[in-house]
Amino acid sequence: MSKLVNQLIEDGYLKTSLIIDAFSEISRIEFVREEFELEAEANVALPIGQGQTISQPLTVAVMLELLEPQPGHKILDVGSGSGWTTALLSYIVGEKGRVIALEIKKALKEFGEKNVDKFGYVKNGIAKFYAADGSKGFPNEAPYDRILVSAEASEVPEALKRQLKIEGKMVIPVKNSLWYLKKKGENDFYKEEYPGFAFVPLVTG
């Protein structure tokens, strides 16, 4: 287990054994640009090109612990970037699960897809990548057990709310806070807010 993963466990950010296993197996170095490989184990966000970043490991740990992904889930991963969250989620959902990764910037979508397939998840059909506007979700594969958004929105997109299953969970950054949403009914959401997080803006178009 890497020093980074041990530190995240020690500091109480990584708690769930399946998420800890994913962090241990899916090394972040596979998802950073070559010039940042020496910093891959640092607990900081790093540039991945196109004005985007790979999120700080601490932040990803918090998001996944809130999301509570499970084996067999179908998960929408919005703003998949260099593919790290997609690969972590693919490890967790396993062969019976699916992860739909949306990245609006085509070059990044291709970079992420290539990175995730280092682990065979694209080849074996667990992860599917699309160059698409994440704020609109991906209705073709809806509804989703979980939705993870890794870029900041000014509000929760209605399309994402609609595409979440009843009892499904979403984690999304809204105005410097992480929002945890649980869908209780068609228009009924339970919400918790965790302030103090910074993300790149959700690009739409």
Image (cartoon, helix red, strand yellow):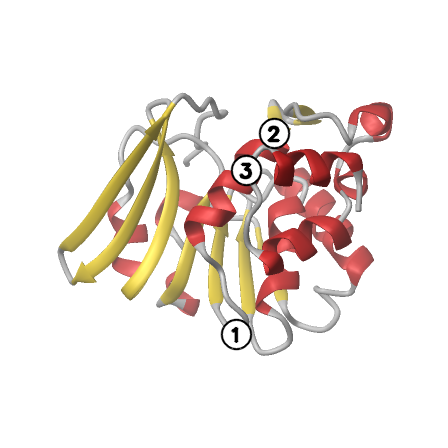
Residue type highlighted by circle 1: Gly
**How far apart are the two marked residues, 3 and 1, measured between alpha carbons?**
26 Å
Q: Is residue 128 visible?
A: no
> Looking at this view, is 178 or 204 the one in front?
178
Residue at 36% over, 50% down: 170
Number of the front mark, 3 or 1: 3
Sooner in the amino-acid sequence: mark 2 or mark 3? 3
Mark 2: few/some/many CA within 10 Å (<14, 14-19, 20+)? some
Determine contact: label 2, label 1, CB under 8 Å.
no
Sooner in the amino-acid sequence: mark 2 or mark 1? 2
Mark 3: few/some/many CA within 10 Å (<14, 14-19, 20+)? few
Q: Is residue 58 above or below residue 69?
A: above
Q: Which residue is mark 2?
A: 56
Sooner in the amino-acid sequence: mark 3 or mark 1? 3
Viewed as shown, does residue 186 lie left or right of 158? left
Q: Which residue is mark 1?
A: 72
Q: Which residue is mark 3?
A: 12
Viewed as shown, does residue 138 lie left or right of 93? left
Q: In the figure, residue 185 lies in which quadrant?
A: bottom left
Element type where label 1 sits in the image: loop
